[in-house]
Image (spheres, rainbow, N blue to C red):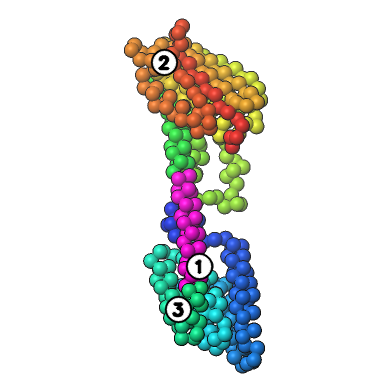
């Protein structure tokens, strides 16, 4: 499947997961070929032992069926037609071979066709495979032989449908995983843009205030804006890369790419906030390195969103304390500022969506988050993120 023309999870139910790997196709061929040679080949040798001419022709037809099974995944309809025709010929040459045995390769092809093609196609193939059943009576097979043949054909078709249902479920799981991943990426984009733009707006306002009287400070603010914009663009490229095709192995982008969001970069995050005039104090306990990626990213984003909320919504806040504690079983994150909540509101105005995002991040890694105003003033965000079982 062309990765550029179809995103993961967009396969139809009948082709969930795409064409099987080459090793699976080879294993299927060897297994089905061995089955046909063992069952039909043995039956042909025994039934044709008294007539070498018919035996030779029958053996060649069996080998043709075995060779045709090599393409049963790629062209199941053609393989079914060929194996059915050659099987009926074998049965006509050696009536001692049962109809079920003579059409064994065709039943294998029917099973593969049922698993890979649309239901309407497989139902027509099932009907065609049932047509030779009345011939069993004329050959003296009797009701028992015909019943065995019909049951074998129906079983082959049913096994194919079961496999098709499995592939459809796998496709549904893949599509759900893609949707969840894209939702996570959307949250990543929101966090990056919200935080960076908040800092850039504050610096732009500061630059405007001091542009005439203190040009050096204005230039410093503009440089901070440029740095923040470049950082945001780099992170956006990393996030949006998930929507594009995979890079070639020889590409060196990974070697030159900046490290992604992580608790190890808290100092950089704090510096961008300090540049606005806010006092940020960091307290770290435990080893930050080696944490599961999902927990590391979730903790960083919670701190980032909490700082963004402080900048944008905490009236009068000039101090914020960030504490990250890494224990054996969990990571605890606490962000406390000294701002004031708006009158009549238990949370800063406009911070509702940010709090929802932080709670969702904590929930996705199996953790919890609480947020609210403190009795003595200020606002606190506290998250507990379990480490065990995280990726």
Identify the mark at residue 46; answer none if there is no mark: none
Q: How many marks?
A: 3
In the displayed structure image, the side of residue 295 where residue 316 appears, left or right: left
Q: Which residues are magenta?
A: 150-178
Residue linked to disc 1: 156
Q: Residue at x 53, y 28 (%)?
A: 367
Q: Disc 2 to disc 3, how far (Cα)?
A: 81 Å
Residue linked to disc 2: 314
Q: Nearer the viewer, mark 2 or mark 3?
A: 3
- Where residue 253 sits, quadrant-wise, is top right
The question of residue 171 being in magenta is answered with yes
The question of residue 13 being in magenta is answered with no
The single residue placed furthest to the left in the displayed view is 344
Estimate how packed mark 2 is, as few (under 14), some (14 to 19) or many (20 or more) residues with alpha carbons within 10 Å.
many
Q: Find out whether the residues at labels 2 and 3 contact each other: C-beta distance under 8 Å.
A: no
Which comes before the other along the chain, label 1 or label 2? 1
User: Is disc 1 placed on a helix, strand or loop?
Assistant: helix
Nearer the observer, 266 or 212: 266
User: Is disc 3 placed on a helix, strand or loop?
Assistant: helix
Measured as percent of width and height from the top left, residue 10 is found at: 43, 53
Q: Residue at x 56, y 77 (%)?
A: 101
In the displayed structure image, the side of residue 24 where residue 368 appears, left or right: left
**Which quadrant of the figure contains the C terminus?**
top right
Q: Nearer the viewer, mark 3 or mark 1?
A: 3
Estimate how packed mark 1 is, as few (under 14), some (14 to 19) or many (20 or more) residues with alpha carbons within 10 Å.
many
Measured as percent of width and height from the top left, residue 286 is found at: 65, 22
């Amino acid at each position: 499947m062309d990765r550029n023309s179809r995103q993961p999870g967009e396969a139809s139910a009948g082709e969930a997961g795409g064409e099987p790997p080459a090793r699976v196709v080879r294993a299927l061929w060897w297994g089905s070929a061995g089955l046909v040679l063992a069952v039909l080949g043995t039956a042909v040798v025994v039934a044709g032992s008294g007539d070498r001419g018919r035996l030779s022709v029958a053996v060649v037809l069996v080998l043709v069926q075995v060779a045709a099974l090599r393409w049963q995944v790629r062209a199941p309809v053609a393989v079914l037609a060929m194996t059915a025709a050659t099987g009926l010929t074998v049965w006509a040459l050696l009536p001692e071979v049962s109809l079920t045995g003579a059409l064994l390769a065709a039943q294998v092809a029917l099973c593969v066709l049922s698993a890979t093609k649309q239901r309407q196609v497989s139902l027509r193939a099932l009907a065609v495979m049932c047509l030779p059943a009345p011939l069993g009576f004329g050959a003296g097979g009797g009701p028992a032989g015909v019943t065995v043949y019909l049951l074998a054909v129906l079983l082959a078709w049913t096994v194919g449908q079961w496999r098709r249902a499995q592939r459809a479920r796998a496709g549904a799981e893949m599509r759900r995983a893609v949707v969840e991943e894209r939702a996570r990426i959307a949250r990543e984009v929101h966090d990056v843009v919200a935080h960076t733009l908040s800092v850039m707006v504050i610096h732009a306002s500061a630059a405007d205030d001091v542009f005439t009287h203190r040009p050096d400070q204005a230039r410093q603010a503009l440089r901070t804006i440029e740095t923040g914009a470049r950082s945001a663009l780099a992170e956006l490229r990393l996030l949006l890369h998930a929507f594009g095709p995979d890079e070639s192995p020889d590409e060196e982008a990974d070697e030159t790419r900046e490290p992604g969001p992580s608790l190890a970069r808290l100092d950089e995050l704090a510096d961008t906030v300090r540049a606005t005039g806010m006092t940020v104090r960091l307290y770290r306990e435990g080893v930050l390195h080696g944490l599961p990626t999902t927990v590391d990213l979730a903790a960083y984003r919670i701190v980032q969103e909490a700082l963004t909320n402080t900048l944008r919504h905490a009236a009068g806040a000039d101090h914020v304390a960030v504490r990250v504690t890494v224990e054996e079983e969990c990571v605890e994150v606490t962000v406390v500022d000294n701002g004031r909540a708006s009158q009549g509101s238990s949370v800063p105005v406009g911070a509702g969506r940010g709090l929802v995002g932080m709670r969702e991040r904590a929930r996705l890694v199996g953790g919890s988050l609480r947020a609210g105003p403190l009795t003595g003033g200020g606002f606190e965000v506290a998250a507990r993120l379990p480490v065990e079982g995280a990726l």
